[in-house]
Amino acid sequence: MFIVKYTGPFGFIKPWTAVRDEEVYSQQFLTPSLVAGIERKLFPELLKEPWGIYKIKGHRITYSQVSQQQEQTQPRGWNEKGRGAKKEYSRPYAILKRGILVNPILFLAFDTREDAEKASQQHICLARNEDILYPEEEIIETTHADFNENEELFYGFELVFEKNDNAFLVGYNRLNENQPMHGWLRVVGNPVKSAI
């Protein structure tokens, strides 16, 4: 297994549950759709493939804190009120709170050195273009077991994309016929470091 480490001064994960994120608190893991999107950014040849995750075999994300930010939104549709000459159209505003990850670190695991080298030459975006994470030069070679158990090197949160007794619903994949996305949360070491 070959690991590429990405870091940045900030990052933003836009969860599928953005409107209800104060209740769900999904900032600390990457959904299958986010990982598939990162993979297609790194390997654009996968854009022609059916939806799935092909090359990223595991991931881990950590950060030093979540800074809550407010964002003003408007719906796409219009509200209609009144009749005739007094007819009015309006679009109400709403305020959402979303978390910005401060000092995020993301580990991506690949089966081949070739895939890791290609990934290590590119930046990634967790959700929006301005939220960029840059790769470190060194590619870490390790075993699958070490990646899942080494609390000093690979600490963080990982949503394991399996449906089992520990799994929970993390959203609906609009790129795959709105199929439900499930996973269970693997926590390695102390996933939130106060001084990274």
Image (spheres, rainbow, N blue to C red):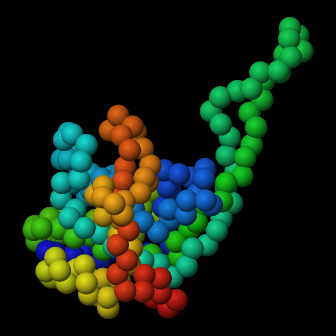
For residue 81, side relative to residue 196 (left or right):
right
For residue 37, side relative to residue 1 (left or right):
right
For residue 16, side relative to residue 135 (left or right):
right
> In the figure, residue 142 lies in which quadrant?
bottom left
Q: Residue at 20% x, 64% y: name it.
A: 57
Instruction: Please tell me which residue lies in front, 123 or 180.
Output: 180
User: Which quarter of the image is occupied by the N terminus?
Assistant: bottom left
Is residue 27 at all visible to an observer of this figure? yes
Q: Residue at 77% x, 21% y: name it.
A: 80
For residue 140, side relative to residue 60 (left or right):
left
Instruction: Please tell me which residue lies in front, 45 or 57.
Output: 57
Task: Give residue 12's position: percent from left, percent from top.
Answer: 50, 64
User: Which residue appears farthest toward the top when viewing the image?
Assistant: 84
Decide: is 153 above or below 15.
below
User: Which quarter of the image is occupied by the C terminus?
Assistant: bottom left
Q: Residue at 10% x, 71% y: name it.
A: 113
Is residue 129 at all visible to an observer of this figure? no
User: Which residue appears farthest toward the front when viewing the image?
Assistant: 165
Task: Give residue 189's position: percent from left, percent from top.
Answer: 37, 86
> In the figure, residue 164 lies in which quadrant?
bottom left
Task: Give residue 29's position: percent from left, percent from top.
Answer: 42, 66
Task: Give residue 120's position: percent from left, percent from top.
Answer: 23, 71
